[in-house]
Amino acid sequence: MRLQGKIAIVTGGSRGIGRAIVELFAAEGARVAVVYRGQRDAAEQVVQGIQQRGGQAKAYQVDVSDWAAVKNCVEQVLTDWGQIDILVNNAGVIQDGLFLQMEPEAWYRVMQTNLNGTFHFCRAVVETMFRRRQGRVINISSVAAERANRGQTNYAASKGAINAFTRALAVELASRNITVNAIAPGFIETDMTQAVRNVAGEQIQKAIPMRRLGKPEDVAKVALFLASDDSGYITGQVITVDGGLSLGGISA
């Protein structure tokens, strides 16, 4: 097992990409803190499924945009399990709208969850990693940071900032054997992308050279690599998982 004995926190862990990461990490031997905001039943279902398969997981409810709540959550994980080896910042929201129709609240909510939430958990967790001189931080970004889409100025800005944050933090922490990387998924079959898929339909797949949508497991496998010892000399990178979408070409 590649993560045997490791303690991992995964935000937004009750569904979609987060759930796939939680389940794969647990299958590889990690004890996983499943952080969720509102979907208690979904989070508990994930935890119960892992426990039934012989793994270890526990659900923690917290709004990632709330600094005090995040600090309390991290302190509770340390109380429960003693250490934190891996942090996956996956929690995120989309609130699309054309810029001239976008209310400030839509901008603030996306930034507070996607960007501030990433900062909050990094700030709370990295301190304990720093003292132990080891750790893995994985931020979930998006191809939207580089491939512009109408109606996503807030989302694109939040993910572009996460990419820059990832690189800058990686420089600061490298000497302490803490790696910081990001994963930029393309169109993945999740609840979050359902509305876009309903509108665009088959046009999405035509724009993807591999001619299929990604699955949460496609992203989870990359997260597992970045969380494991196999990636020990990789830091400050943004790894794209999009079936070739961001290449901008048209395959035959």
Image (cartoon, rainbow, N blue to C red):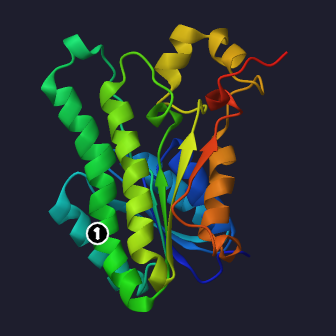
18 left or right of 245 in image: left
Q: Is residue 35 visible?
A: no
Q: Whole-percent x and y of residue 154?
A: 30, 30
Residue 6 lies in quadrant: bottom right
Seen from this angle, which residue lies furthest bottom?
Answer: 132
Q: Which of these two is toward me, 225 or 216?
A: 225
175 left or right of 53 in image: left
Q: Regarding mark 1 in the picture, which secondary structure is present there?
A: helix
Q: Is residue 68 visible?
A: yes
Tell me the residue that label 1 is attached to. Answer: 123
Say what amino acid the circle numbered 1 marks. Arg
Q: Residue at x 33, y 45 (%)?
A: 114
9 left or right of 69 in image: right
Q: Whole-percent x and y of residue 63?
A: 25, 52
Seen from this angle, which residue lies furthest right?
Answer: 252
Q: Whole-percent x and y of residue 87?
A: 45, 67
Q: Residue at x 47, y 45 (%)?
A: 141
Q: Residues within 10 Å of mark 1 (few under 14, many from 20)?
A: some
Q: Whole-percent x and y of residue 48?
A: 54, 60
Q: Which of these two is toward me, 77 or 225?
A: 225
Q: Which of these two is toward me, 132 or 39?
A: 132
Q: Quadrant of the N terminus?
A: bottom right
